[in-house]
Amino acid sequence: MRKFTNSFGTLETAVLQSDELFDTVRNFFPMEEKGISEPICPDSKLPPSDKFSRTQLLLSGWQMVEENFPLPIQGLVERKYAGYILTKDKYKDVTSFSPMFAIDCEMCKTSTGELELTRISVVDEDHKVFYDTLVKPDNEIVDYLTKWSGINKKMMKNVKTKLRTVQEELKKLLPQDAILVGQSLANDLHALKMMHPYIIDTSVIYNITGDRSRKTKLQTLAREFLKEKIQTGQQGHCSTEDSLACMKLVQLRLKKHLYYGDAVMNNVYSEVRAYPDMGTSHYATSMLRQCVKVDKKVKVIGLDEIGQRYQFYVNKGEGVNNVKNVTCTQEKSNKEVIKSFCDSLTNFSLNIAHIRISEGQLEGTNMKILKNIDKWAKEVYDRSSQPSLVIVLFGGQNHGNGTCFIKLKREFI
């Protein structure tokens, strides 16, 4: 990132001017026209609801490789992707007005030991069901995986539609410049045995961990960003519900800004590790919000300055509405913080104690402060009820790595 920002000024300029940074997949797929595609040079015109071009959310070729999307690469088609087909015979260049279709597939385990497609749902930008059908696998189903798939034996009893039929129908229905949307969509395309060049993947464009390799479940994304509960039933997932959630997430991103909900890209520009649009960058604030959502009581104890900061986020912070459930108290020393903390453990569902260790206390071979911390941790553990989870965090110095110790206290049977 430093290399490209030094050379081009900003990453946006680098994307527009450097073939090395942003590659399209047009070389893999048969294109109807040649020329400069919009992912490299977006139009100035946008749909009324969009703040930026939807083409800027498309996965690049490298991302599609990293996310294990099937691609018509010579050699792989004959071996790994034998039997796969393209969604269209030829494609048009994608634009800011290219239609989006959210896809979600459900699979069951068959006699081959593999997962095979048993349902596909496609939702359009108007949140209407564009295509939805159950699919009879080529092989016998040995496990319906109902807990996840939502598919059961009764549903599949009279199903005649085969995968080949689904492929042919999608090939006819999808436009040449269609943008497919989904959560970890590579899995769905493998189930469909189809390849497509224009992909927006909600598991990539939304990230609340700051680490691309750590994906967040669609259920969590829907709860945090859409304020909706999905996948709550006991009968498994619903593919129309999941595809609709994906479409709403992409549309929400387009209404906000390019880095909305993406801790990875937010870090690039702010150089601050944060969870954008999810309350604040302070982890504990988000913890308070989650507790008060389920009507649990929280106690925060810290030194003067820290206690005041917590109180500010309780009173004016985002999402902490039930203020009466959160109590912030201040003490004058670390020792008093620990004492007060231990005294309140049994009265609150979440207890947070903030102590502060100065850099001077950590210099040389002085072990006194470490012994004190060890003693305080033992005291907290001994005073905790059963069951409970005890977490000790060391934040690190000068942006260095922190350390986390976790202990589950429970009775052994």
Image (cartoon, rainbow, N blue to C red):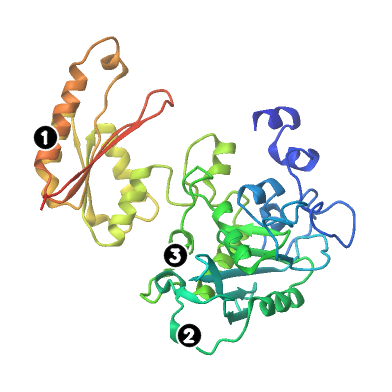
User: Is 13 situated left or right of 392 in this image?
Assistant: right
> Element under label 3?
loop
* Residue ranking furthest to the right: 34
Return the x and y of residue 179 as percentages of the image width and height: 70, 64
Give me the residue at 76% from left, 38% from top. Answer: 20
Task: Give the Cα distance between marks 1 and 3.
Answer: 39 Å
Inspect the image, locate mark 3, and give the three-letter code of the amino acid beneath it: Lys
Q: Closer to the camera, 316 or 66? A: 66
From this viewpoint, is residue 210 visible? yes
Q: Badge 2 is on which residue?
A: 155
Inspect the image, locate mark 2, and give the three-letter code of the amino acid beneath it: Met
Task: Give the mark toward the camera: 3 or 2.
Answer: 2
Q: Badge 1 is on which residue?
A: 379
Is residue 336 shown above or below 246?
above
Q: Earlier in the sequence, mark 1 or mark 2?
A: 2
Give me the residue at 37% from left, 43% from top. Answer: 283
Task: Give the Cα distance between marks 1 and 2.
Answer: 57 Å
Q: Closer to the camera, 186 or 251? A: 186
Disc number at residue 227? 3
* Residue ranking furthest to the front: 112
Q: Quadrant of residue 306?
A: top left
